[in-house]
Image: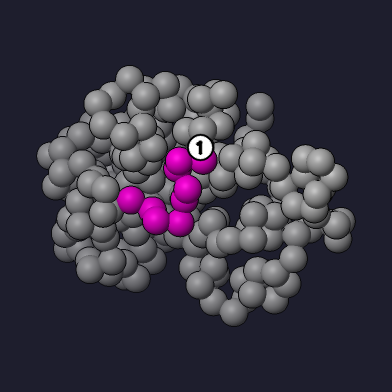
Amino acid sequence: MARYTGPVCRLCRRFGDKLMLKGDRCPTPKCPLEKRNTPPGGRPPPRGRGGRGGVSDRGLQLREKQKVRFSYGVLERQFRRFFSQARRSPGTTGENLLILLERRLDNVVYRLGFGDSRAQARQVVRHGHILVNGRKTDIPSFLVKSGDAIKWRETSTKTEYYKRIAEEIEEGSVPNWLSLDKESMTGRVLNLPAKDDLEAAFNVKAVVEYYSR
C-alpha cells in the first residue's frame, strides 16, 4: 500500500480527531476540524451488523489501527512488522507497539521540535540533515536507543530552515524521556519511553484485537 498523499486534514475529519498532521496549525482555530467537524464526502455513516446504524466492532478496530498508522506516517507493511516485533517482546503488546513507534528517528526528531510535524521531520531525516551519535542517519524508521545523541549536521546549520527552528524551539516542550540542549541544538535519549509517556488518545487494545483475528 502506497503512502497517503492527499489532504491530511481530510484524515482528521474522517477519524473525528486531531492527528496533529499539520504541525502548528492543528491547535489553532484554522484547523478544518474546528470549522467543520464532519466526515468528508457528506455520506451517512455506514450500517453495522444486522442492519443497525453505526460501525461494526471489526470496523472500529480497523479505524483505530488506521488512526495510529496515519498519525505516525507508517506504511501498512511497516506497521505489521512493528506489531509482530511488539508481540514477540515481553510486556503488553499495545504498549510495546507505541514504544517502538515513538523510538522511530522521524518521531524523535519531531518530538525534539526539529520539525513542525512528523511528515516534516521525516523529510528532514531523509535529506540527511540529522546525525545520530555523530553519524549521518537518513532512515526515518531507525530505532533510537537510550543514550543516543541526535543533532544537526554542520552544513545543515547554515540553512534558513535550521535558523528558524533554532530561534523558535523551546527546551521545555520535549517529553520526559528526551532532553534538548537549545544552545547546541542537540537532543539526547535519556531512556526509552515508558507507559506514562505514550499517547493516551489511541485505543491500542482495539489495534491488538484487529491483528489477533
Q: Quadrant of residue 31?
A: bottom right
Q: Is residue 110 magenta?
A: no
158 relative position to 148: left or right? right
Q: Report the residue marked by disc 1.
A: 207
Residue 191, image x, y percentages: 15, 44
Q: Quadrant of the N terminus?
A: top right
Q: Quadrant of residue 75?
A: top right
Which residue does the image show at 65% across and 69% down from the upper left? 33
Dominant SS type (magenta): loop
Which residue does the image show at 33% across and 20% down from the upper left? 88
Q: On screen, 50 above or below 89?
A: below
Residue 22: in sight, yes or no? no
Name which residue type carries label 1.
Val
Which residue does the image show at 56% across and 62% down from the upper left? 18
Residue 23, image x, y percentages: 50, 62
Q: Is residue 204 magenta?
A: yes
How packed mark 1 is, by other alpha carbons closer than 10 Å (few <14, some 14-19, many 20 or more), is many
Nearer to me, 87 or 131: 87
The magenta-colored residue range is 198-206
User: Which SS class for mark 1?
Assistant: helix
Residue 199, image x, y percentages: 38, 53
Q: On screen, 91 above or below 48?
A: above
